[in-house]
Image (cartoon, rainbow, N blue to C red):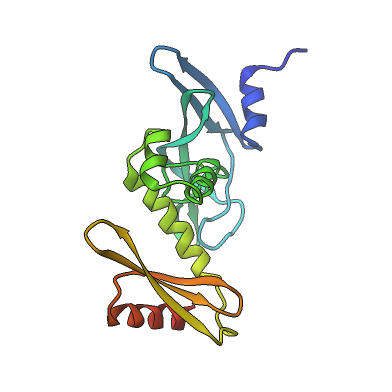
Amino acid sequence: MPISQEALFKIALNLEDPWYITTIDFSAEGKQLDIHVDFKTGSKFPCAKCGKTSCSVHDTIERTWRHLNFFQFKTYIHCRVPRTTCEDCGVKQSKVPWARKGSGFTLLMDSMIVLMSQHMTVTAIAEMIDEHDTRIWRVLEYYVAEARCNEDFSEVRSVGVDETSRAKGHKYVSVFIDLDKSRVIHVCEGKDASTIESFKNGFRAA
């Protein structure tokens, strides 16, 4: 029995019950693929805040996320995201398995942006995926902050600092390095005494 395109894309997106694909719209002229996702009637979801299971759906909110391109075509996922009623937390928007809360990109799109940022400028990434650079910066800022929260500087004993010009007009960036492990532990704009204060605050917070 041949597999439907909806079932095929459900597998590709790694969707599990109660999520399923309702329709797939492809526009060759608009160079865009739109995938519409929904959940089965009567489904219950965990509370996004406390994790309590089997919370009933209060209402839904229409959301859209940019996904990885399908060949050269922009791809978007559309879904009515449920808001659940929790006895302890009230009404909360449910988490979806393909994107983090508050993001306009899917997790796979996030991953590609982070990977590309290790080898390309944000401007180049924005041009390549046809998105505004501010959206790219938001993704990077989120994951940098998350990574910083998991840093442990308790064993740092020797720190070196250097400065480099990042653009014409004498705009400088100061880089602080753990000399024992040869790793960057702080980066900030400027080269004056304020950079030391910036490093100190970041070091204490880690």
Q: Is residue 83 above or below residue 89?
A: above
Q: In which quarter of the image is the N terminus?
A: top right
Pick whichever, 48 or 198, lies toward us. 198
Q: Is residue 202 above or below residue 34?
A: below
Pick whichever, 66 or 51, lies toward us. 66
Point out residue 48 in the picture as x, y percentages from the top left corner.
52, 56
Residue drawn at x 48%, y 18% is: 25
Q: Quick one: which residue is furthest to the bottom in this view?
A: 157
Q: Taking 56 as reference, is 1 left or right?
A: right
- Can residue 88 be seen by looking at this rendering? no
Res 204 quadrant in image:
bottom left
Point out residue 147 in the picture as x, y percentages from the top left corner.
52, 65
Pick whichever, 56 or 204, lies toward us. 204
Point out residue 49 in the picture as x, y percentages from the top left corner.
50, 61
- Can residue 37 be seen by looking at this rendering? yes
Please give the count of numbered marks on the rendered protein. Answer: 0
Res 161 quadrant in image:
bottom left
Q: Quick one: which residue is furthest to the left in this view?
A: 169
Q: Taking 163 as reference, is 168 left or right?
A: left
Residue drawn at x 44%, y 13% is: 28
Residue drawn at x 48%, y 58% is: 143
Q: Is residue 128 above or below residue 155?
A: above
Q: Quick one: which residue is furthest to the right in this view?
A: 1
Point out residue 198 in the picture as x, y percentages from the top left corner.
35, 78
